[in-house]
């Protein structure tokens, strides 16, 4: 029988065995990428949020008023010197590298951006920790894959890039499924990236496990233990209404972010001075309206503030204030993400609509607003719904959230918070 066995069959068996072996290597490398990303994200969060920002928030009020401007100055210096002139982009770097295989993600830019992110976010810049977390994981994955090309023959060149991005999201939000879905969904409008699901899932799981091993498994949003989010059929109409208003808000915010990114091309002294002055005024306004420093930080304090009853005009004012604070921080060259600012905007819109439609259950509408605004802004409806499910532990909102996310997606059109997202038919 050996004499009549086709040689091509032996070759194919050898190739198949080699592919299986390298597949195991890729999964192992994805796990390593996820675990290391989890450690990096935890250290980044600890320094930026638990040490530096905690000190700023506990300091006298005048410190909080000038700290964001000082953070922008430090960020510009770090990007120029340590980052060798790197831009302030983070999650956009992931998308740019995803679509351009020749685009380099270098160590000096990596160190500069992460250090500048600590300066920006630690000083109270109104952006999220998730942007640098996505960048930390994706750049790490890309650099590992570039140094081990033999293990990735016949595999997509973006395999560990996507795996690292998924791990960064999974770690910072303690949401492994959200990490994998977001990393696969965000590169394209209306379509998931293909052929990288398994590495993304593995990296997300290991990023999450490593992060929570160093912290805890508590969801980032919490509610009373004896309360669960439920909905009535009239809330489905409210969900559609929220989706429409969130899409309108997300379109306006996306346009504001485009202007802010354009402003970063101005001379550094001018943009930092203007942005610092505006952030000072926003801090004073926020303190005058609410007695709290709601213009500072990523915005988790705003979501907690929404747990109390407020006048509708005040909700609208804080919405505008937070959107302007985020855009101003970005325009000044701050390094951070817009994922959580989208979450905050959606929470405010949801609470506003909820007070009009169903004031007896504002929590449900806050969650619907988060799903709709986030899904519309980044064009990631699946990741947005999963994000709220994982970060709240409240499954009762999922059906109306789907209504809100779909209606927001339809109204959003072709707009997006990022210019590097592509349409599937233009690949």
Image: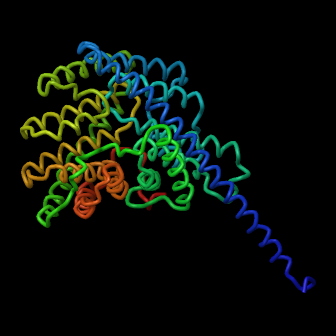
Q: Nearer the viewer, residue 397 or 338?
A: 397
Instruction: Give the colour scheme of this rendering.
Output: rainbow
Horizontal and vertical percent for residue 155? 64, 58
**Residue 186 can be seen, yes or no:** no
Q: Is residue 15 above or below residue 169?
A: below
Residue 33: image location, x then y, percent: 59, 45
Residue 367 visible: yes
Residue drawn at x 58%, y 27% as measured from the top left: 108
| Residue 249 figure quarter | top left
Image check: 330 left or right of 353?
right
Residue 229 x/y as whole percent: 21, 56
Reply above or below: 244 against 337: below
Placement of 126 over or under 346, stated as above or below: above
Residue furthest out toward the right: 3
In this rendered view, identify the residue nearer to me: 200 or 211.
211
Coordinates of residue 388 in the picture (x, y in percent): 31, 52
Residue 311: image quadrant is top left
Number of callouts = 0
* In this rendering, position of residue 143 left or right of residue 316: right
């Amino acid at each position: 029988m050996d004499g009549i066995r086709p040689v091509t069959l032996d070759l194919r068996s050898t190739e198949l065995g080699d592919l299986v072996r390298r597949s195991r290597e890729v999964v192992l490398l994805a796990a390593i990428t996820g675990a290391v990303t989890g450690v990096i994200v935890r250290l980044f969060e600890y320094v930026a949020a638990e040490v530096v920002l905690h000190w700023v928030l506990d300091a006298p009020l005048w410190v909080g008023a000038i700290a964001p401007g000082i953070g922008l100055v430090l960020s510009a210096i770090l990007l120029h010197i340590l980052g060798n002139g790197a831009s302030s982009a983070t999650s956009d770097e992931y998308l740019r590298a995803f679509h351009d295989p020749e685009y380099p993600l270098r160590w000096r830019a990596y160190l500069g951006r992460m250090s500048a992110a600590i300066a920006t976010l630690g000083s109270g810049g109104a952006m999220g920790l998730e942007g640098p977390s996505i960048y930390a994981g994706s750049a790490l994955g890309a650099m590992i894959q570039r140094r081990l090309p033999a293990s990735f023959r016949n595999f997509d060149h973006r395999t560990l890039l996507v795996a690292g991005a998924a791990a960064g999201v999974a770690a910072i939000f303690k949401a492994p499924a959200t990490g994998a879905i977001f990393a696969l969904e965000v590169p394209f409008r209306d379509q998931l990236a293909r052929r990288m699901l398994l590495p993304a899932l593995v990296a997300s799981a290991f990023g999450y496990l490593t992060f929570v091993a160093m912290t805890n498994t508590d969801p980032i949003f919490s509610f009373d233990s004896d309360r669960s989010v439920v909905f009535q059929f009239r809330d489905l109409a409210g969900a559609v209404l929220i989706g429409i208003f969130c899409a309108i808000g997300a379109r306006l915010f996306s346009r504001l972010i485009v202007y802010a990114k354009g402003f970063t091309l101005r001379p550094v002294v001018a943009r930092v001075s203007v942005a610092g002055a505006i952030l000072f005024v926003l801090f004073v306004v926020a303190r005058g309206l609410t007695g709290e420093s709601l213009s500072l930080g990523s915005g988790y304090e705003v979501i907690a503030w929404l747990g109390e009853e407020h006048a509708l005009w005040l909700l609208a004012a804080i919405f505008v204030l937070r959107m302007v604070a985020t855009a101003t921080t970005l325009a000044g060259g701050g390094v951070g993400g817009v994922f959580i600012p989208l979450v905050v905007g959606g929470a405010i819109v949801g609470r506003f609509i909820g007070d009009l439609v169903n004031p007896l259950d504002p929590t449900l509408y806050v969650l619907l607003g988060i799903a709709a605004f986030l899904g519309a802004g980044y064009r990631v409806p699946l990741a947005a719904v999963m994000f709220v499910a994982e970060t709240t532990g409240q499954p009762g909102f999922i059906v109306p959230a789907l209504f809100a996310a779909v209606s927001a997606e339809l109204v959003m059109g072709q707009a997006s918070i990022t210019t590097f997202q592509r349409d599937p038919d233009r690949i």
